[in-house]
Amino acid sequence: MLVALGAPAQEPAPDPLEIVRRSVERDWTDFESRKNYTYQERSEFRQYARNGTVASMRSETNEVLILGGRPYERLISRNDKPLAAREARREQAKLDHELAKRQHESSAEQARYRKERIKERAFIREIPDAFTFRLVGNGAVSNRPAWIIEARPKPGYHAIHSQAKDFAKVRATIWIEQDTYHWVKVDADVLSSISVDFGLLRIAPGSSVHFEQTRVNDEIWLPSSMIVRFQARVALLKVLRGEYDIRYSNYRKFQSDSKIIEGH
């Protein structure tokens, strides 16, 4: 008894469900903050043969700009080579057209866009109810402490939003920063087939997603990488084995008085 009385009291382990609930509430704020940064996004697609060798590979690099307070992707290279002059002019013309369009949007059009974005992300709020959570440890991402939480589909859960129906087919491990409750790393695995494109494409069990963020300017978490490994059946006939490797770089704070200049 004396030993017990003299020992420091241990803090109870944090509730993983409460951590996830708070983190989901943070999601929209983090998404909105991204419009303050421009960056580059390089996507590489590798297709694999049946024996596991690379059958083909291609890449595209886009510059993500801020037009009218919203992101816009401009293609700047293919397979790490600058676009041909003709295609570069075409991409610049598309950018100029979109910039002029957004500069003349009415307040009603802007409000409709914001409403659509909120609707598109509404399914995220189902995450706390769609899974059971277990705190499995502590780690660090970008040298910042994070909880490591395991998420498994909750038996019998029925999705409210159509985009949430596939939660039942995925399990994940999530790293959530302890200071701000932002998701900073996710490893997810597909447990059973997921149908997309009206059933024309079926993602097979064993496919996986790895997503990670990095701390930028010590003020915001922004994506650093995403790797999607998959096996899929196309139109129930052709089997496709591939990998998307997406890297994000060159984050720069957007200035409202910045000008879009051709070739930059």
Image (cartoon, helix red, strand yellow):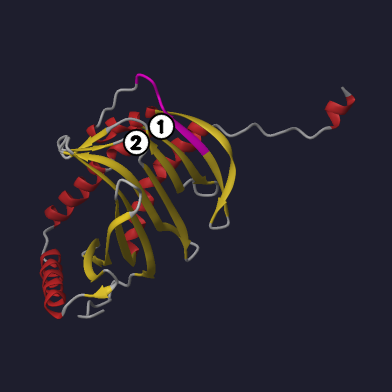
Taking the view exactly as shown, the residue that stands out farthest to the front is: 51
* Residue type marked 1: Pro
Which residue lies at the image location 39% right of the left edge and 38% below the top edge? 189
The alpha-carbon separation of the residues under discs 1 and 2 comes to 7 Å
In this view, the residue in front, 219 or 95, is 95
Q: Is 207 one of the magenta-colored residues?
A: no
Q: Secondary structure at mark 1?
A: helix
Viewport quadrant of the C terminus: bottom left
In which quadrant of the rendered view does residue 144 lie? bottom right
Q: Main secondary structure of the magenta part?
A: strand
Left or right: residue 15 versus residue 114 is: right
Eyeballing the image, is 43 above or below 231? below
Q: Which residue is mark 1?
A: 128
Q: Which residue is mark 2?
A: 125
* x and y, in percent, of residue 196 in the image: 20, 38
Picture quarter with the N terminus? top right
Looking at the rendered structure, the secondary structure element under dot 2 is: helix
Q: Position of residue 239 (x, y in %)?
A: 23, 41
Residue drawn 49% across the image and 45% down it:
181
Which amino acid lies under the numbered mark 2 shown in the image of this protein?
Arg
Nearer to me, 75 or 1: 75
Q: Is residue 160 left or right of residue 129?
A: left
Give the residues drawn in magenta, as a range. Answer: 149-156
Residue 121 lies in what quarter of the image? Answer: top left
Number of numbered tags placed on the structure image: 2
Task: State whether residue 42 appears in this view.
Answer: yes
Please state if 62 lies on the left or on the right of 229 as rendered: left
Mark 1 near mark 2, Cβ–Cβ under 8 Å? yes
Question: Looking at the image, is 1 positioned above or below residue 72?
Answer: above
User: Going by the image, does 54 lie left or right of 134?
Assistant: left
